[in-house]
Image (spheres, rainbow, N blue to C red):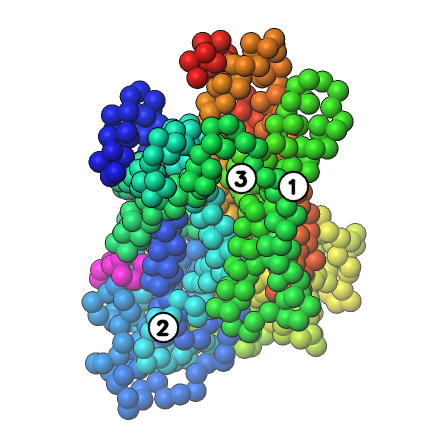
Amino acid sequence: MIRLGLRLSLKGGKEAAVRLAVTSAAVAIGVCLLLTAFSGMHAFSAQNTRAAWLNSGNFGPQRRPPATANPNPSSTQTLWWLLDTDSFADQTIFEAAVAATGPNSPVPPGIPRLPGPGQYYASPALTRLIQSTPAAELANRFPGQQIGTIAQAGLPSPTSLIIVVGYDAQDLAKMPGADQIGAFNTDPNVPGPATGVHNDRLKIILAVGVVALLLPMLVFIATATRLAAARREQRFAAMRLVGATPRQITVISTVEACLAALFGALLGIGLFYGTHPALTHIDFTGQRFAAGDLAPGLAAIVVVALGVPVAAAISARIAMRRTQTSPLGVLRRVTPPSPRAYRLAPLVLGLAELVYFVAFGHPSTTGGQILAYCSGAVLIIVGLLIAGPWITMVGARAVAGHARRPSTLLAGRRLADNPRAAFRTISGLIIALFVASATVGVLTTILSYRGTVKTDSSARQTLIADISHPDLIGINGQAPAQTSAATNDAVPPALLGELTAIPGVHGASVVYTEPGSNPDSSLGLVACSQLARTPAIGTCPAGAQVAEVSGLDPFSSGQQPSLSGHLWPPATMTTDQLAELSPRAIVVQTNGSTVSLEQARTTLELAFPGQTASTLSEISANAQRTITEMQQIAKIVIVASLVIAGCSLAVSVVAGITERKRPFSLLRLAGTPLRVLRRMVLLEAAVPLVVIAVLSTALGLLAAALFLHAQLDYTLKSPGAGYYILVAAAITTSLAIIATTVPLIHRIAGPDIARNE
């Protein structure tokens, strides 16, 4: 029987060869996307694991005061450590300050030894940037000698900008936030400045999205392995009538399905490795992956190579059930039994599980939450697949009951007669819409509550430097030129003159701490003469000397409000009194060019060593970096899901039309116009597509609302018109794909088909 199955597959004529080629190609696309998904998950893990060492020690928006521990402890196993961030042209630079306490102090990954005072290691990307940029814009921030580059083991991405600077232990111990560590962090889940998609709640979203992406792939592969299923059913039914046993039929069908799936799996693995180099150039998370990151691993390849043929064998066995139980029923085209309402049970259970978490709370551990929400999402998706035929039948009967045209009546009766086959055609797209709706709904709501990244021109042109701790020892190991916070001295006019002398700088304002205000408050005072040159942070009322500003908080990681054009209230003090207060921040407004921004940033960081100057857009972007990365991943999931669904739809429609050659031919012989058949095919696909697409989108948003309420206590925000336009475009594209297959009817519905069949 195995040899017979191979002969029927390989030497069964043109039809068998076309079926084998199309099925193999479809499976290859699914396997390639499946391996890409596995490699993406592996790449996220590898990238975040290499970034874990940056999250060692003490870091946060509220730094601890200078360490009081002995800078020369007796233990030789510790290291003085301080990590800060800087920026260049909207790119984040990680600055790691290290100082050894002895010969056995830990060494960061990627470098052979600790740098001494006045020495540093830089990543290859930062090294190239330093060498290609004028010193006044970047290199002057890192005085000293570069003694090497950081290897890949210490770099999250080939594009990472990281510098490890050596210090004297006495100096580094005095810096606020400096910490003694005995080893570098290796846990990628530890929060810190380099944390990307590791936020627990967002990691749950990612896990649900990946699971939801895999299901359309599996549906696509199952659809491909069932090509020409009706034609094969007839052939196998005839074999049963001449004496073949059910077991023999099962073996033959399994061999045919496994052969196509095996060819497709091998072709898909080759296709994946052929496209693999191009994947490393795509910024999935805002940072490129290293070439080795996008390796799915031998285990994943073996699972796919063996799992796809096994899945094909199971699909073939399920498809042959009618042939085994009633071969005469297959040949006589007996109408399959109608789906029952109990098919709604898994869908209701999935929604009930999410409602349970809203009412009684979610599991306490991240792993438990991932399991809980993934199981709920899978139940809903599987429930959609199981309930889809019943919903299609209900909709079809409604269409047939209100039909006014022959094509509408034929389409409604056809759908009601076999809703399973009709729904199978659109099942991949339905899952894609559910995934897209749930993902977009969650991310839109999170961004709505946490604020969006500022992208207006004033935000990109305005630098703000926190100078509330200017007594730090800076990157050059020297004391700063002024100690404003310690002595209440005003910022030297020479510094403001140096800033305004930079080409492209329009003005600079000093924000002073309001007397008696909380150190964490966003209140401040600004001289109106300076504020007039930096309108991006507001304006003064007429006649005022000093304005009281608020909401301009360079120390907060939260969203920065839009202050351009805002009229501030006057303060009850003069410019002379203002000069006696402690300066808190310096705001510099530029024309937005990289040269002016980076020269001003370098000037500020040299004047106030250890401090960082950032644009308002960078402050907002850093606060939303994780959400932005998740948006990027969500876009990939949505686009990939729609691509998979489109491929599945094309394969299903072509297969469905091909399998109905004889009915179409008989209808033509009975006098049915060709345009009626074409309209009927379009309606057969459009009715379940539109009905279940609306239901799937609504269920996706409902699942997102339940997840947000249970996990974050947020209320769902509408994704906006852009997403609904995307959904409409997906449905329109699907209908266009269906329309491209309609010309096949003319070719296969001739009278000779009915005679030969």
Circle 1 or circle 2, nearest the eye: 1
Which residue type does callout 3 highlight? Answer: Ser
Can you see residue 404? Answer: yes
Give above or below for 180 relative to 21. below
The dot on residue 185 is: 2
Distance between the alpha carbons at the discs numbered 3 and 2 = 45 Å
Q: Earlier in the sequence, mark 1 or mark 2?
A: 2
- Residue 692 in sight from this viewpoint: no
Q: Position of residue 248 (x, y in %)?
A: 31, 40
- Amino acid at the residue labelled 1: Ile
Residue span colored magenta: 143-155
Viewer-closest of 154 and 661: 661
Q: Which residue is mark 1?
A: 391
SS category of the residue bearing label 1: helix
- Sequence order check: which comes first, mark 3 or mark 1? 1
Dot 2 crowding, Cα within 10 Å, few <14, some 14–19, many 20+: some
Verify whether residue 165 appears in magenta. no
